[in-house]
Amino acid sequence: MTDTDDLHPYDDIVRRFHHDDTDELLRARGLALVARLLRLPSLPPLGLRYDMYFYSGGIGISDQIHISLPCTPTEANAIIARLGFATPEEAIADEAWRDDFEFLVLDGNDTEPLHIAVAAFVEEHRAEFQPPPDEPMRTWFSRESGPNAWSLVYEREGVLSFLALEQA
């Protein structure tokens, strides 16, 4: 799911990075992780927020990642292209991915419109500093997203937000 170098040595230590970190080394590492996860050549000078939690140990891996940054629709399209993410509609149309995606997002409720289910999924998993889902909102998921590991990006009103979870 994520390219996170040495964050999973199975030592039962939580590694957390936050946009308010005062330790310069933690802050530098957090910024580098954000740039790598979103495949950004540079980070925006203002407005970047993130909270990233990485754990590995006796229970396996548990990662939670939340990132938000100011972004134009053109910049969002470029990030999505670099990430290779797909829209919810593309996920449903992909026979190999459909079942895992529906299990993840629809949670057995196949009568609910897809955009409503996606908005509810975002609302359930977003961080407080990330904008609430609402129209207009564009959403994309990692093609590897399934019940135990997923990542998504949504763009709304000039803010691009990245959410990811892995439990293995």
Image (cartoon, rainbow, N blue to C red):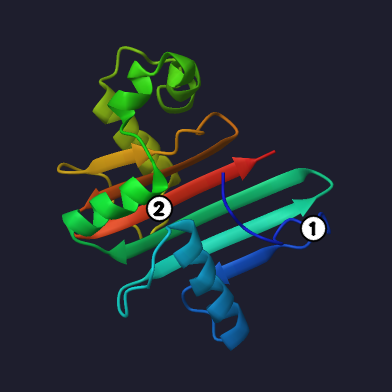
Indicate the secondary structure of the residue bearing disc 1.
loop
| Category of crowding for the residue at label 2, using alpha-carbon neighbours closer than 10 angstroms: few (below 14), some (14–19), many (at least 20) | many
**Circle on res. 9:** 1
Q: Which residue is more in the foreground, 93 or 12?
A: 93
Residue 163's spot in the image, x, y percent?
44, 49
Left or right, 18 with reference to 8? left
Residue 24 versus residue 117 in the image, above or below: below
**Circle on res. 70:** none
| Category of crowding for the residue at label 1, using alpha-carbon neighbours closer than 10 angstroms: few (below 14), some (14–19), many (at least 20) | few
Residue 69's spot in the image, x, y percent?
32, 65
Taking the spot 37% from the left edge, 41% from the top edge, the residue there is 122
Residue 5's spot in the image, x, y percent?
66, 60
Residue 19 versus residue 73 in the image, above or below: below
Residue type of the residue flagged with mark 2? Phe
Residue type of the residue flagged with mark 1? Pro
Taking the spot 40% from the left edge, 47% from the top edge, the residue there is 83
**Circle on res. 162:** 2
Indicate the secondary structure of the residue bearing disc 2.
strand
**Residue 18 appears in the rendering:** no
- Alpha carbon separation for disc pair 1 and 2: 24 Å
* Earlier residue among tags 1 and 2: 1
Left or right, 163 with reference to 4? left
